[in-house]
């Protein structure tokens, strides 16, 4: 059988051919559920005509039925094309995900002491070697709404950031929002007294910006490792006090 399919929606074994513009003799049978074919929706006019000819040892009705009910998903090339078709959606879903980082540590110092030391962000360069400097930019005593400006070392350069306390319940909870050009970090630290001192927990949500959105799995791994190292340094610093 000689078949000359076009890029329109076929209506049966007798397939109409298209002209050079693909719009005069193309079959216009409605698609299922009253919806036009995607090709007609997104590319109503095109200037390509494609012809394929093959010989099938069967009558036209049998051949047409086999084409209509054939399962192409088992063909490797088709499977690869289906994966590529789904890739943009997967990328969008990945970009929309925020990174969550949680953890805890026990510090052998009273809860008031640990809270006050951590609440003064100017102390952080003592236990976080990536933080180059911190200055308080809001007036008054440290509390709700206090803001700091800091510089953090990342990829060999200093990156400015601002930190604002969005929650302040001494000595139990310290919530904050940190803004960088590359991301925003929101979350809280909680402080609970235990027999050996203070259990401090952290819970952060990181929302990357720009191209970093595509790197959320890597950011999660790096962030968890860095947080654990920072608070382990804090523990060593405070535990060493008399």
Image (cartoon, grey):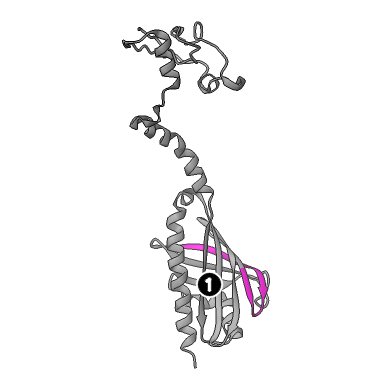
Q: Which type of secondary structure does the marked residue at label 1 adopt?
A: strand
Q: Residue at x 47, y 54 (%)?
A: 216
- Quarter of the image where one finds residue 191: bottom right
Where residue 160 appears, x then y in whole percent? 51, 63
Where residue 68 appears, x then y in whole percent? 45, 19
Q: Residue at x 51, y 80 (%)?
A: 106
Q: Residue furthest bottom?
A: 242
Q: Is residue 183 above or below residue 39?
A: below
Left or right of residue 58, residue 233 in this image: right
Left or right of residue 55, residue 221 in this image: right
Name the magenta segment's main secondary structure.
strand
Q: Is residue 17 above or below residue 212?
A: above
Task: Find out whether residue 54 is within the magenta segment.
Answer: no
Left or right of residue 76, residue 151 in this image: right
Left or right of residue 141, residue 22 in this image: left
Tell me which segment is drawn in magenta.
159-175
Q: Is residue 127 visible?
A: no
Where residue 55 appears, x then y in whole percent? 31, 10
Q: Is residue 23 above or below residue 225?
A: above
Is the residue marked by circle 1 packed among few (<14), some (14-19), or many (20+) residues within 10 Å?
many
Task: Find out whether residue 168 is within the magenta segment.
Answer: yes
How many numbered callouts? 1
Residue closest to the eye, 134 or 175: 175
Residue closest to the eye, 105 or 30: 30
Residue closest to the eye, 61 or 188: 61
- Quarter of the image where one finds residue 129: bottom left
Q: Residue at x 38, y 62 (%)?
A: 156
Q: Which residue is mark 1?
A: 134
């Amino acid at each position: 059988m000689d078949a000359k399919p076009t890029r329109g929606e076929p209506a049966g074994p007798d397939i109409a051919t298209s002209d050079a513009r693909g719009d005069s003799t193309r079959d216009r049978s409605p698609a299922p559920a009253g919806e036009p074919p995607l090709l007609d929706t997104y590319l109503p006019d095109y200037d390509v005509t494609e012809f394929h000819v093959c010989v099938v040892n069967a009558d036209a009705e049998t051949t047409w039925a086999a084409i209509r009910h054939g399962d192409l998903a088992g063909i490797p090339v088709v499977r690869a094309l289906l994966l590529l078709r789904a890739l943009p959606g997967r990328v969008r879903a990945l970009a929309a995900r925020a990174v969550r980082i949680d953890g805890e540590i026990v510090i052998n110092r009273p809860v008031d002491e640990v809270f006050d030391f951590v609440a003064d962000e100017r102390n952080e360069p003592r236990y976080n070697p990536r933080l180059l400097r911190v200055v308080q930019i809001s007036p008054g005593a440290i509390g709700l709404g206090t803001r700091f400006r800091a510089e953090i070392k990342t990829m060999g350069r200093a990156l400015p950031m601002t930190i604002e306390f969005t929650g302040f319940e001494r000595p139990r909870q310290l919530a904050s929002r940190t803004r960088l050009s590359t991301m925003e970090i929101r979350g809280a630290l909680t402080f609970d007294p235990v027999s050996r001192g203070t259990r401090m927990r952290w819970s952060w949500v990181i929302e990357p910006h720009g191209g970093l959105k595509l790197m959320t799995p890597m950011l999660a791994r790096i962030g968890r490792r860095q947080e654990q190292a920072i608070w382990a340094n804090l523990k060593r610093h405070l535990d060493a006090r008399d």
